[in-house]
Image: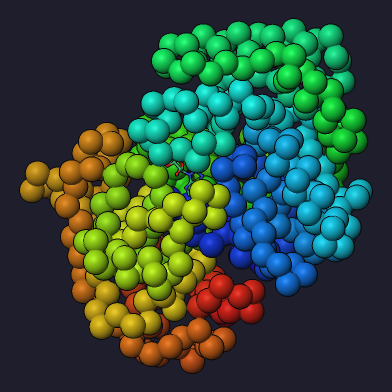
């Protein structure tokens, strides 16, 4: 992916998250000098296999598994320090050398226990089906200018004041939501004082560090979390996450100029899934959804929740191509469709009998659209051992060609299994 022209590459999810970005990032990171997370927080999850054990990285870019690659958590991320240190300790226990190659932006906002408490106690969060990781409340505090940033840990007096303000606001919210739970300022300050020395060692002006690395010719991978349809501006609002998941957010959230992004790779499943509530126009009927879920192992990495499943939606992916400026697509989990005799693909929507050619802004309209399907023949052969596009069954190639045409974006990768080597690079 990196060459003389593409030095900074952004990888985004082009559906509702869980597209398999982690695996792509893992493979591309091998050739990168820097991997930077730019938004979201511990709501994301990427399962990694290490030392015969399996665990999930929520906060640290999986690039950390490649020796020599520098990993950074950008200013646009909301950082849960507890999760961060649990992950660091786990990595170190498994022999991964983290020291000197993990950086945390001094401008990143912290997710504290009261943010998680608010998220879990809020009826609005339940209605959206959030991950309960405190993401929404932490971004709310950031935008309302009462957030606590990594660099605030350098000034204990100021920190106390900030925590006091945050807690007072949180307790008013908790009371208003009918919860009898309350956050405690002393406990929060004590937690931060305990974590500060470890966190400050990692604190860095990440935007500046990556800028300098770029000037020296480094290959930089900007790693998105969640998916484009969960973007707070472009997604199926209000059923979205609280950050800018799309490529515009990558510039702001990594602290780089938009003009420094050379290419944007959009990761899409060969079908569609969504976890949490909100419209999903191509959701399959329960028995078929269950079959896809079983074949694809579609359960959330962070919450274990079963994912809602359905067919590939070209309106969604075309929209993601536009709002991200995608320069290439990576189609994942093609093998999950190996046993289907025919595979429906959504080529457009109708609303009240009228054709729509793009995603409506109104969530209620998205919930009411009818998906217009084309029935494509299945290949009914295993594909997980295939390593060259030319070796795929003709119907599988025709399926991919159709997705590429409908999305109006060139396909760069196809993945046919969960392992790192099960990726086909499109010539
Ligand atoms: P939050 O990000 O926890 O506030 O959740 C908001 C919405 O985004 C919910 O529908 C979540 O299920 C969804 N979401 C958050 N993170 C992920 C993810 O990593 N994959 C898929 N969906 C996610």
Q: Is residue 27 above or below residue 188?
A: below
Q: Residue at x 78, y 25 (%)?
A: 191
In the displayed structure, does residue 214 sit left or right of residue 380? right
Image quadrant where residue 95 sits: bottom right
Q: Residue at x 43, y 88 (%)?
A: 382
In the displayed structure, does residue 78 sit left or right of residue 376? right
Residue 233, position as x, y percentages in the image = 44, 34
Q: Residue at x 44, y 78 (%)?
A: 335
Image quadrant where residue 273 sits: bottom left
Residue 109, position as x, y percentages in the image = 69, 27
Residue 82, position as x, y percentages in the image = 73, 37
Q: Which part of the image, by quadrant, shows the N terminus?
A: bottom right
Q: Residue at x 53, y 88 (%)?
A: 385
In the displayed structure, does residue 32 sit left or right of residue 196? left
- Residue at the extreme front: 180
- Residue at the extreme left: 353
């Amino acid at each position: 992916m990196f060459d003389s022209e593409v030095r900074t590459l952004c990888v985004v999810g082009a559906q509702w998250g869980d597209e398999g970005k982690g695996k792509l990032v893992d493979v591309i990171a091998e050739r990168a000098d820097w991997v930077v997370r730019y938004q979201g927080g511990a709501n994301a999850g990427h399962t990694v296999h290490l030392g015969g054990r399996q665990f999930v990285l929520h906060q640290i870019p999986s690039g950390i598994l490649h020796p020599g690659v520098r990993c950074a958590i950008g200013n646009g991320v909301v950082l849960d320090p507890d999760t961060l240190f649990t992950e660091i300790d786990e990595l170190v226990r498994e022999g991964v050398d983290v020291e000197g190659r993990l950086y945390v932006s001094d401008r990143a906002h912290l997710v504290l226990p009261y943010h998680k408490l608010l998220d879990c106690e809020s009826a609005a969060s339940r209605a959206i089906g959030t991950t309960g990781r405190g993401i929404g409340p932490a971004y709310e505090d950031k935008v309302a200018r009462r957030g606590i940033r990594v660099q605030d840990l350098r000034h204990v007096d100021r920190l106390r004041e900030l925590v006091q303000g945050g807690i007072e606001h949180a307790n008013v919210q908790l009371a208003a939501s009918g919860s009898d739970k309350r956050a405690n300022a002393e406990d929060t300050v004590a937690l931060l004082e305990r974590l500060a020395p470890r966190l400050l060692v990692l604190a860095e002006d990440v935007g500046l560090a990556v800028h300098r690395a770029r000037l020296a010719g480094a290959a930089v991978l900007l790693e998105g979390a969640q998916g484009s349809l969960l973007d707070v501006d472009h997604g199926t609002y209000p059923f979205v996450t609280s950050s800018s998941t799309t490529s515009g957010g990558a510039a702001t959230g990594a602290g780089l100029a938009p003009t420094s992004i050379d290419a944007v790779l959009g990761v899409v499943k060969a079908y569609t899934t969504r976890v949490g509530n909100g419209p999903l126009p191509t959701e399959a009927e329960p028995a078929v959804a269950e079959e896809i879920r079983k074949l694809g192992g579609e359960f959330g990495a962070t919450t274990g929740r079963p994912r809602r499943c359905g067919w590939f939606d070209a309106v969604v992916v075309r929209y993601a191509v536009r709002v991200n400026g995608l320069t290439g697509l990576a189609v994942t989990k093609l093998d999950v469709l190996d046993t289907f005799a025919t595979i429906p693909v959504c080529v457009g929507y109708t609303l009240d009998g009228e054709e729509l050619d793009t995603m409506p802004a109104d969530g209620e309209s998205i919930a009411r659209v009818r998906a217009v399907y084309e029935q494509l023949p299945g290949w009914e052969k295993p594909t997980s051992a295939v390593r060259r596009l030319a070796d795929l069954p003709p119907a599988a190639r025709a399926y991919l060609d159709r997705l590429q045409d409908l999305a109006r974006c060139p396909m760069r990768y196809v993945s046919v299994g969960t392992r790192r080597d099960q990726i086909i690079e499109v010539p």
